[in-house]
Image (tube, helix red, strand yellow):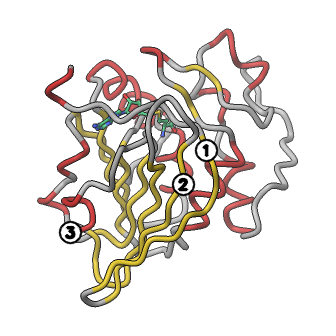
Amino acid sequence: MDKRPNWDFQEAQDPRVRAVMRRVPRHLFVSENQRALAYENVALPISCGQTISQPFIVAFMTEQLQPQPSDHILEIGCGSGYQAAVLSELVAQVFSIEIDPVLAREARDRLKGLGYKNVTVRTGDGFEGWPEEAPFDAIIVTAAAGKIPAPLVEQLRNGGKMVIPVGPPTEPQILTLVEKTGTSVITRPLLSVRFVPFRRESEM
Ligand code: SAH
């Protein structure tokens, strides 16, 4: 099944996000033997024991960032590149960090092959963010962190938003919205979620 079905994705409030979700070919981001399930609202395995999130979660996290056409966005956990592709259709630039070099290479090739020109993928530990490209209008973390990494808060511009699953790897985590305003950082719990754990470079 190389051709995508006519996907009537309804699970986003923002019509722009709904339109992008219907357009990005999710079946080309999952392994070949999972393609039949690509347009179901389920998380699916990708290479290297990692997971591509359920479409509802991708749309929900995207909406929390309130992406604007001029935005520069940082993603931690590129995985298949699917979330980066969705964001890239809504903003000016996406910078995505992936700790696994195999996944990073696959995602870079896939995004290039599909014509996504405004996504830059780098191999590395996302805990430190991407200081050379900071500040970011928004940051999205797609692996579960025990705590909110301080360098990421630092690299968020004033008024910027970050969405990140926070909690232990073995239990549901709390998807958290972080808003930076002036000198204060406000965190708001959004949803209970299950993400693969954030790994550190020292553990690789
Ligand atoms: N957003 C992805 C799915 C992410 S799965 C998609 O749309 O397909 C979580 C990813 O985070 C995995 O690929 C994992 O290798 C990566 N990851 C885990 N710890 C990381 C870290 N410290 N820095 C960067 N990436 C990390």
Q: Quadrant of the N terminus?
A: top right
Query: How much space separates mark 3 and mark 1, taking CA atoms?
Result: 25 Å
CB within 8 Å, label 2 to label 3: no
Element on which disc 3 rests: helix
CB within 8 Å, label 2 to label 1: yes
Picture quadrant where residue 99 is located: top left
Mark 2 or mark 3, whichever is nearer to me: 2
Element on which disc 2 rests: strand
- Give percent across and percent down for residue 105: 31, 25
* Residue behind label 1 places its C-beta within 8 angstroms of ligand 1: no
Compared with residue 108, is residue 100 higher up or lower down, i.e. above or below?
above
- Give percent across and percent down for residue 95: 31, 52
Q: Quadrant of the C terminus?
A: top left
Circle 3 packing at 10 Å, graded few (<14), some (14-19), many (20+), is: some
The amino acid type of the residue labelled 3 equals Glu
Q: Is residue 56 left or right of residue 156?
A: right
Q: Residue furthest bottom?
A: 182
Q: Earlier in the sequence, mark 2 or mark 1?
A: 2
Q: Earlier in the sequence, mark 3 or mark 1?
A: 3
Mark 3 or mark 1, whichever is nearer to me: 1
Circle 1 packing at 10 Å, graded few (<14), some (14-19), many (20+), is: some
**105, 137: nearer the viewer:** 137
Residue occupying the point 64% across, 24% down:
44
Which disc, if any, is residue 175?
2
The amino acid type of the residue labelled 2 equals Leu
Query: How much space separates mark 2 and mark 3, taking CA atoms?
Result: 19 Å
Which disc, if any, is residue 154?
3
